[in-house]
Image (cartoon, helix red, strand yellow):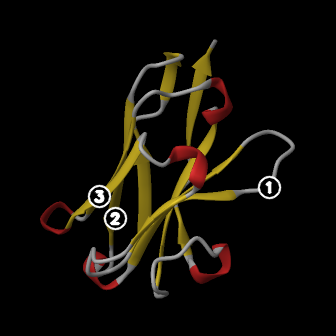
Amino acid sequence: EVQLVESGGGLVPAGGSLTLSCVASGFTFEEYAVGWFRQAPGMQREGVSCISRDKGRTYYRDSVKGRFTISREISKNTGYLQMNSLQPEDSAVYYCATGSGAGGPTIWSYGLWGQGTQVTVSS
């Protein structure tokens, strides 16, 4: 079955850290860019961080630069989002996605999405 499964979300205090994982199955993971997106209640889904197929290009939205790190481990068919210094405004459902694009934050360029994992940061 072609799918992405996220894990690693949870409740943390402000300043805490979480690492999200995204395990891919049913397709050749290394051929696709990986993106992490988030959606808070009442808000539009937004791109958080993306990485290209060859890991040569990464994108971070301004509000997470210096705090979040995206990576991928081809041998494990897994993508990661390391999140440090979390703030309440980072609270959202986080989704990983794969796409055939260049690895930018454009939502429509990602065709396969996971079910999402909740991240809640308390103040």
The mark closer to the camera, 3 or 2, is 3
Mark linked to residue 93: none
The amino acid marked with disc number 2 is: Ala
Residue type, label 3:
Ser
User: From mark 3 to mark 2, how far is it between C-alphas?
Assistant: 14 Å
Q: How many marks?
A: 3
Residue 44: image tag: 1
| First of labels 1, 2 by sequence position | 2
Query: What residue lies at 72% left-to-right and 57% top-to-bottom?
Result: 45
- Callout 1 secondary element: loop
Quarter of the picture containing the N terminus is: bottom left
**Closer to the camera, 69 or 4?**
69
Task: Pinpoint residue 63: horizontal percent, then vertical percent.
Answer: 59, 46
Q: Is residue 11 left or right of residue 42?
A: left
- In x, y percent, where is residue 34? 42, 69
Q: Earlier in the sequence, mark 3 or mark 1?
A: 1
- Residue 86 x, y percent position in the rendering: 51, 28
Q: Quadrant of the C terminus?
A: top right
Residue 14 versus residue 65 in the image, above or below? above
Q: Which residue is mark 2?
A: 24
Q: What label sits on residue 71 in the rendered view?
A: 3
Callouts 3 and 2 close, C-beta under 8 Å: no
* Amino acid type for the residue under numbered disc 1: Gln
Residue 4: quarter of image? bottom left
How far apart, in angstroms, are the residues tagged by discs 3 and 1?
24 Å
